Structures are given as C-alpha cells and as structure tokens.
Image (spheres, rainbow, N blue to C red):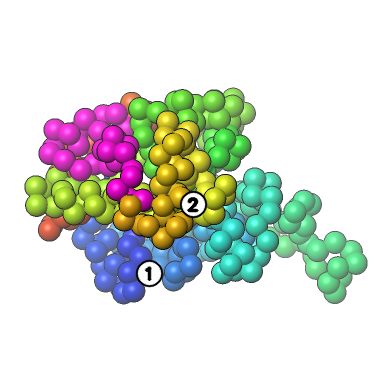
Amino acid sequence: MLLSTQLQYGDDPINNAEAVVGLEKAGLDVVWVAEAYSFDAVSLMGYLAARTERVQIGAGILPIYSRTPTLTAMSAAGIDALSGGRMILGLGASGPQVIEGFHGVPYDKPLARTREVVEICRQVWRRERIQHEGIYTIPLPEGQGTGLGKPLKLINHPKRADIPIWIAALGDKNVELTAEIAQGWLPHVVMPERMRETFGAALDAGTAKRAPELGPLQVTGGGVLAIEDDMMDGARQMHRHMSALYIGGMGARGKNFYNTVFQRQGYADDAKTVQDLYLDGKKEEAAAALPEDFLAHTSLIGPPSFVKERIAALREAGVTHLHVNPISSDPQKVLSQVKEWLQ
C-alpha cells in the first residue's frame, strides 16, 4: 500500500509545495494537486516536479471540460518529462456549479466526454496523428473554421506513452467506466465496510470489460489522520465540518453526488437532514447531525491501534493508496510512522 496526500489549497503555493518536499523525505509516495476554482493544477505540478525527486505527482483532478483533450495530454506529457516519469493524470467531471458557473461551459455528457478524453490522451502520448470523431471532432470537419486544419502528432517524444490515468467517480456508470478504462479510481470518501454494497456491482461490470494491460485497478482511500492526543479533537471537528460541506453544500437538492453516495452507504435519512440544514444556512447544525459511526469509519483519527485497524479494513476493501490529511504538530514524523505501518 502506497501513501498519498493532497497539496493544500492555501494562498501561498510555494510554502505548500515546500511542505511536500518534507513529506517526501518522510516517505510520501504520491501528492495530489486539486484544481477547483483555485490556482491551476498544472503550474503547481510543474513546480513540484522541480522541487521533488521521488514522489509521484497526481492531478487530483483536472476537469474534463476546462481544456481541450489534446491540451490535457500535452500538459500531462510535459509534467511527466519534467518529473522524470512521475506524472499521474487524474481526470474528473467536477460539477455544474464550477463548470458552468466559473468556466462558462455547459455541463453535458460527462461519461462520453471522459471516455473520449482518455482515448485522445493515449493517442497523443503514442504520437499518433490525431483524428477523432465524436463529441470532440479533430481536426475540425469540413465546413467549420478555416478548413485548413490537418491531423497532427505531438512534436516531442513523451517520457512515457502510458502515463497512468485515474478518474474521480461516484455514480455507478462513472465507476463502471473507471474500472473499464483507467489505471486508478479516486472515490472521494471510502467507507471500507460498505465498499462492496455501494460500488461492487459497478466495479465488477467495468472490470469485466477491462483490458489486461491496464493491470489491477488502483484505489485511494483514507481520510483525516491524527494519532496525537492533543490533535484528535481538532481533527474530528475538521472532518465533521468538511463532510458536512460536501454532503450538505456541494450541489443543489437533488443534484449532489456526495449526498447520493452518503445515502447509498446506508444514511438516507441523515443525508436529507444534513443537506436541508446546510442549504438553510445552519452549517453547525448540519455538521452536528452527521452520524458518529460514519465519521469514525471514514477517518484515521485515534490511537495507533485504531488507525492500524482502519488501514487493515481499507486494504481488505481493495484500497491500494492510503490517502491521508495529517493533522499534527509534526506531519513528517506522523507520516513516517504511518509509512512504517504500511510495510
């Protein structure tokens, strides 16, 4: 099992990147760089490529709507070259609030777009002349544009023609697609005891169509990490409020992917309560309404014996990358300790 974490969002990207340099020395295997409506991920990943030596640098995630497929492939190939082959291309549909509200692009056909983006990226990395017909038609068809477009291939020779692609997926069809075509899956919050009943059918359906050369599907899972007594209460509050934000506030009523997964994990009534409170502006009450067993089973907060039990449960559920958000006076020391437990 590998160890991963998220690059922090803060306003000082250089300090955030320098923290990753220290975590790499402690044994960190993968750092994921988000792109919501923050600084772009590609710039930060390029900086991390220059400042680190061993850690894999994952986009977590690049939205499929905000770039052309070929630009996504070019950026991934560039970072892979700069990092010496340490790039992971994480893709996802994001959500309509960001895609339509920030990028001004219609949020349509996420599954078909994802499949086509993956296909085109792999064509670019193989240095094929890009010809594609679908949602993305490359080159532009006759009658559109100037008529001067012609099939082109990437000028550079990529470091790798098989840069790993991970997909952030929550819904059944998207999870099935991920298990079929991607090297890895970013499922957001993993409750290992309910992984099979929540996602098992979709994973099985996708795996049945999976190409053998992709290898077994890689999966992240974990959560907020705290093993020091004086850090646990703050970590629990952080986990509670962040969970309320996603389950209650990341979307509208009837259109919140995180809320839907929470329902499917066995919390249908709680999901409605949390969302109603959150969208009514009662954020503290929404956080307080989250069930204690859900919070305990989706985090790594407690004494070492508890955290080791949770790691074992995640491993049993198929998690290959323990994803942690360390809350500690000495994050490097804590990550080093956890890294020993993973051996």
Name the foreground residue: 266 vs 185. 266
Badge 1 crowding class, 10 Å Cα cut-off, few under 14, some 14 to 19, many 20 or more, is: some
Please name the residue that numbered disc 2 is placed on. 90
- 173 displayed left or right of 22: right
In the rendered structure, which amino acid carries the disc numbered 2?
Gly
**Is residue 209 located in the magenta-colored stretch of the structure?**
no
Please identify the dominant SS of the magenta region.
helix
Where disc 2 sits, the SS reads strand
Where disc 1 sits, the SS reads helix
Residue 119: horizontal and vertical position, in percent?
65, 47
Please name the residue that numbered disc 1 is placed on. 47
**Is residue 306 located in the magenta-colored stretch of the structure?**
yes
What residue is drawn where x is 59% and y is 62%?
99
What residue is drawn where x is 57% and y is 35%?
172
Name the foreground residue: 209 vs 277. 277
Q: Quadrant of residue 292?
A: top left
Residue 166: horizontal and vertical position, in percent?
49, 46
Q: CA distance from mark 1 to mark 2?
A: 17 Å
Q: Answer above or below: position of 221 versus 94.
A: above
Q: Answer above or below: position of 303 versus 153.
A: above
Residue 143: horizontal and vertical position, in percent?
90, 67
In the rendered structure, which amino acid carries the disc numbered 1?
Tyr
Magenta span covers which residues? 286-314
User: The N terminus lies in which quarter of the figure?
Assistant: top left
What residue is drawn where x is 54% and y is 50%?
253
Badge 2 crowding class, 10 Å Cα cut-off, few under 14, some 14 to 19, many 20 or more, is: many
User: The C terminus lies in which quarter of the figure?
Assistant: top left
* Badge nearest the viewer, 1 or 2: 2
Q: Is residue 119 visible?
A: no
Name the foreground residue: 293 vs 223. 293
